[in-house]
Image: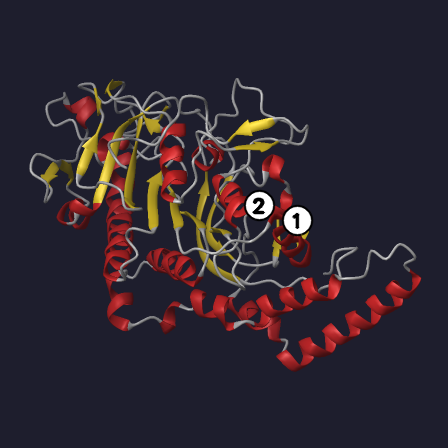
Amino acid sequence: MQRPGSSFPKLMLTINGHSNGRFCDGVARRDFLRIGGLALGGLSLPQVLRAESAGGVKKSHKAVIMIYLSGGPSHQDMYDIKEDAPREFRGEFNAIPTCIPGVRICEHMPQLAKNFDKFAVIRSIAGSASDHSSFQPLTGHSRKGAVQPSGGWPGAGAVIGKLQGSGRSSMPPYIALNGSDPKGGAGGGFLGASYGAFSPSGKGRADMVLNGVTLDRLEDRKSLLEGVDRFRREADMSGQMNGMDAFNQEAFNVVTSNKLAKALDVSAEDKKVAEAYKTRGDRKVNDFLVARRLVEAGARFVTLNFGGWDTHSKNFETLKKQLPVLDQGVTALVRDLHDRGMEKDVTVVVWGEFGRTPRVNGNAGRDHWPRVSSVLLAGGGMKTGQIIGATDRTGGEAAARPTRFGEVFATLYHNMGIDASKLTIPDLAGRPQYIVDPGCTPMKELV
């Protein structure tokens, strides 16, 4: 259905994925690719293109892929196993050596262990908010107990889209796969809805062919809409309709361009490359391949929701299924980036909204634990093959190098060529706002 005031039809595109039930707070948790609406933050694509034009679109090939582990992953069962702790803290998993001497991680992540020279882990992320929201992992700011600027904090993808625009034509700069936040997230914040994520939505791969509409029929519809616009333009005494044709044409080009279609069509990938992403027939691993294809095609910031980590019960039973898929997907992605010579340009960050309790509860689960969590990093020209920070004996507190979310974001922005310590952007009240919290600078251990 066309939105009032839009001069271009709204088209939908979706690749179905998996349903993971609900979080502990009752919020639905969905795991699927949404690629549609051809709208950003509720605006039509022509409106988005006008906004990008007004802000100045720059070209580069640097990008970020953020893999969001919605639900809150159990850090001490992944990268920070406490082998010497009592069993009620240590849990059921053992640690295995990695290719880096002295570094050990979970036995259910063997591919990551073999390729750990391409990764870095920060074990001491502190100051998480204890709610199921990707707001903090997407913005670097907490929305709890703090006054937000007028319009609210924008996500990092929105900031990068604002400052650097689209890397290449026919590709939105900020794309959210699988719905990156079940509670609404950051969006464009004070930058405006036009800088929110391009979030594909719909109900089937058939939408990829415009719900069965051929290009000829689409051209006919476009001509009809142009006729309506001409009628409106004749009645428009203010002249606001003038100049819309170029933006509508570019929007039409995005819809009909094969660039987006090719990026999303993993069946067109080289079979040897695609095979590296496969594990146990789990289709979700394809999403990692889609993310790589999107940044290669020109997207600057891609978020991928890889859900299923809210393990208040059956923590170890769940992770035995989750970890091998994550292990395969993220390792294949990073190796693929290296094979393509993209490891210095594309930063990969893997984290959730918080960690989980040191003590295993009576349901063989772990509950929310905002005091400390971990993040897995790769690419971006960073110094990898290392562990940064440490937690105490039970994995409940940061014992060395406590790290703020803003420090990680300052590092991500640095990798994109953005100096977050100096840059300010005006909020809706016209007040200049730094894009990271005061005192947050790129991490010297990584850059």
The residue lying toward the viewer, choosing from 249 and 286, is: 249
Instruction: Tell me the residue at 49%/32% (across/down).
Output: 435
Label 2 neighbour load within 10 Å: few <14, some 14-19, many 20+: many
Counting residues from the start of the chain, the first of labels 1 and 2 encountered is 1
Asked which secondary structure carries label 1, the reply is loop
Pointers 1 and 2 in contact (C-beta within 8 Å): yes
> Where does label 2 land, which residue?
196
How far from the left and from the top, in percent, is residue 140? Answer: 44, 31
Label 1 neighbour load within 10 Å: few <14, some 14-19, many 20+: some
Q: Nearer the viewer, mark 1 or mark 2?
A: 2
Instruction: Tell me the residue at 78%/70% (across/down).
Output: 225
Q: Is residue 340 above or below residue 48?
A: below
- Mark 1–mark 2 Cα distance, whole angstroms, equals 9 Å
Q: Is residue 197 among what the camera can see?
A: yes
The residue lying toward the viewer, choosing from 361 and 304, is: 304
Q: Is residue 306 among what the camera can see?
A: no
Residue type at tag 1: Gly
Q: Is residue 122 above or below residue 114?
A: above
How far from the left and from the top, in percent, is residue 62? Answer: 39, 52
How far from the left and from the top, in percent, is residue 186? Answer: 54, 37
Quarter occupied by residue 383: top left
How far from the left and from the top, in percent, is residue 366? Answer: 31, 27
Residue farthest left in this picture: 101
Quadrant the C terminus occupies: top left
Residue farthest bottom in this picture: 216
Quadrant the N terminus occupies: bottom right
> Where does label 1 land, which residue?
42
Residue type at tag 2: Gly
Instruction: Tell me the residue at 59%/46% (across/down).
Output: 195
The residue lying toward the viewer, choosing from 317 and 305, is: 305
Q: Is residue 59 above or below residue 410?
A: below
Asked which secondary structure carries label 2, the reply is loop
